Amino acid sequence: MNPDNPKIPINTAPVWFRLNNKDFTWLNITTEGVNGSVVGDIVESPNLKFGDPSKPLYVGITPFDILSTNPARTNNITFSRITLQCVESAVITCDYRSLINVPEPVKAILAFKEMVFTSTANNAGGKLDVQPNDSLDYWGLKLVPKPGFSSAGLVSVKTGQIVLTAAGLAETRHFAQPFWLTWGEMLANGTMGRLFFDYNSAGQQFDKFNYIHNAVALSPINPDPAKKGFLRVGGTAFFPFFGGDYLHIVDTYTPGMAGDPFNGRTVTLSNGTTGSFLPSDLTIGGNWSDGLGIFNFNIQYASVTQDGFLGTGVSSIRNLLGGDIGSTLDMNSRGTCIRIGTNLMDQRSIALGPVANISNITRIWGCVCIKGDAIENMVVGGEVTNAANMSIAARVGSYLSAILQVNPSLAKITIDGEAYMSLVASLDAEVNGHMQLTMNYAEGFLEGEVQGKFMVAAGSPVLVGGSLQAEGQVNWHLGIDFNELQGMVALKVMGFEGGVGVSAGFYIGENAPKSRAWVMVGEDPRFALNMSAMPDRLTGIYGYFHLHQGINLFVISGDYDIYVGLGAFVLPAPFPGAVAAGLGLPYVVGNLGGRIHGDILGGLVSAGAYFDMQIMGPYPFSFQGTVGLEACVLWVFCGSVDLTIGLNSHDGFYIQ
């Protein structure tokens, strides 16, 4: 036979190989037996059938269909290879590598290696060599090798089985890890036999939720050719904050839905019991910070997005009075969030620390975002109604919004718009602006801030026959560390023989930081109080009155200011001059200032002068006096000069 142009009679020699490395192939037949070495890549051979279905131990039903090349990989024509070495008919080396064409439902071309033929021409089997993209077609699952093993399993020609001992079934759309097999059987006719999973859930996740599975199965073959198989998985999913829930997952291969978000898979949750699979537990709940927030939901799989879970239920918020409120839940691979409020007509009251009830809010919205395994904070908002008998209520016909922020150590409410606010008994004020109340449970203080316009109407018992309008800011801090209340307002009082405009400020402090006493600095720098001699912590009261009055006599016009400030404080114990225990000696603070300014002929010539005198004592001691002059001619040529002389226990004598 010419080795370069073999003439092979197929009928008499059905098994033959054409190799590409003929120089390494030789045979020597002697009376002692066959000696030889056959080594080379198989570039051509007939399709072979391995396995005898007539044998009693054969369970594969049909023989293995052996291919020398993979039709789906036209560039991979040299995978099939044989190495066979024998001495005196005894096989000392055999490594046959080729491909098995596994029919439906597996429908895969799988590679094997190290298949051994004995000296008596028996096939001792080989090793499964899993390649990228190997899969189980009917179920749409990837067949993957287990890391750290040289082969994924064995090819048993005598029984017609591929035994999977170091392989896994991977569904990468929803599950983070393959389902590893300790023993799995794939038959030569393309069906799957027994499957035993090791249930090692290390790193396993379902839609990025940690998942511990305890049951895995492949669906049986559906006689309807249009139907594909599914993967059935049972186990416990762990949801952030809420904890674990048992899920019976049916993950169906749907190649007709290859686009996003399905990507060829459709997940549903089963409520049935099948073998070791139990019904899904579709209720979850959680208690945040010992009742600060209690949440309960019924969940279902997010079938539209195929990612995570949607839930409906109720939330019970400690700071939101009036009972449970409808809520929804969204848990997916991007995060978990609770949305509070499902009925725009719901009304609730807000409770915050010492303020028992801050009106009713409607059109409620809110969000509770979960980071890691815990809730960091909660935000709830809505529109404040005009309900009566509340600390704060909306003004009829106006808009007032409220936003509540809560975490285990702090609660804060912010209110914007027009409202009625109960300040003290029998005194109600109308407020237009911004209000904020903060209760810090961890550090033990209540803070508040109000900015805007205030009006106390005529008829109030406090303002008999008059009304009061004010614009400014008030804030306070009440806590175990210090207490303070301060504010600055511009007032307009009507009804007392006309109207008068004034500015005023007040400060009340107990062990309060001096740096926070912004009212004592004042609104006009000409009358700012020099506090350098005062201790860093203030205990006492201070108030100022600033009157501004304009005069217009046709040719001559002008205005004048009168500023009066007065306060009384006591020294803290560590301060020099203080009593050893408790508070020390008292001291007073006074500030008197004035200014006059005039214009002739609408400002053609203008001039003004001001003074300020401050005194503090007996200890700490401070005296400061300031005088200044201002003038302008023809509205352009302007100048000013001032002189300050002072003496105090902190700076000594100074001239500025």
Image (cartoon, rainbow, N blue to C red):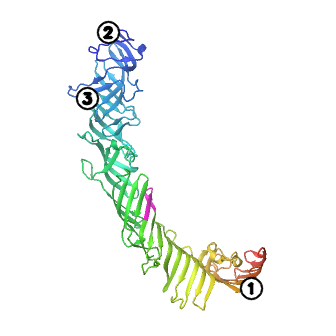
Q: Secondary structure at mark 2?
A: loop
Q: Earlier in the sequence, mark 2 or mark 1?
A: 2
- The x and y percentages for residue 120 are 28, 18
Crowd class of label 1 (few under 14; some 14 to 19; many from 20; radius 10 Å):
some
Kind of residue sitting beneath label 3: Thr
Quick one: label 2, few (<14), some, or many (20+) residues within 10 Å? few
Residue 143, picture quadrant: top left
Identify the residue shown where x is 41% and y is 61%: 338
Q: Which residues are magenta?
A: 366-376
User: Can residue 509 be seen in the rendering of this structure?
Assistant: no
Task: Tell me the SS state at disc 1.
Answer: strand
Task: Name the residue carrying label 3.
Answer: 159
- For the image, the number of numbered tags is 3
Which dot, 3 or 1, sits closer to the camera? Answer: 1
Circle 1 residue: 556
| Amino acid type assigned to the residue bearing label 2 in the image | Glu
Judge left or right: residue 198 versus residue 468. left
Residue contact at pointers 2 and 1, CB within 8 angstroms? no
Query: What label does residue 32 carry, if any?
Result: 2
Residue 307, image x, y percentages: 38, 51
Label 3, label 2: how far apart the Cα atoms are? 33 Å
The residue shown at (65%, 73%) is 536
Q: Quadrant of the N terminus?
A: top left
- How far is disc 3 from disc 1 in space, using C-alphas? 120 Å
Q: Give yes or no for residue 373 being in the magenta stretch.
A: yes
Which numbered disc, 3 or 2, marks the residue that appears first in the sequence?
2
Q: Nearer the viewer, residue 92 or 403?
A: 403
Q: Residues within 10 Å of mark 3 (few under 14, many from 20)?
A: many
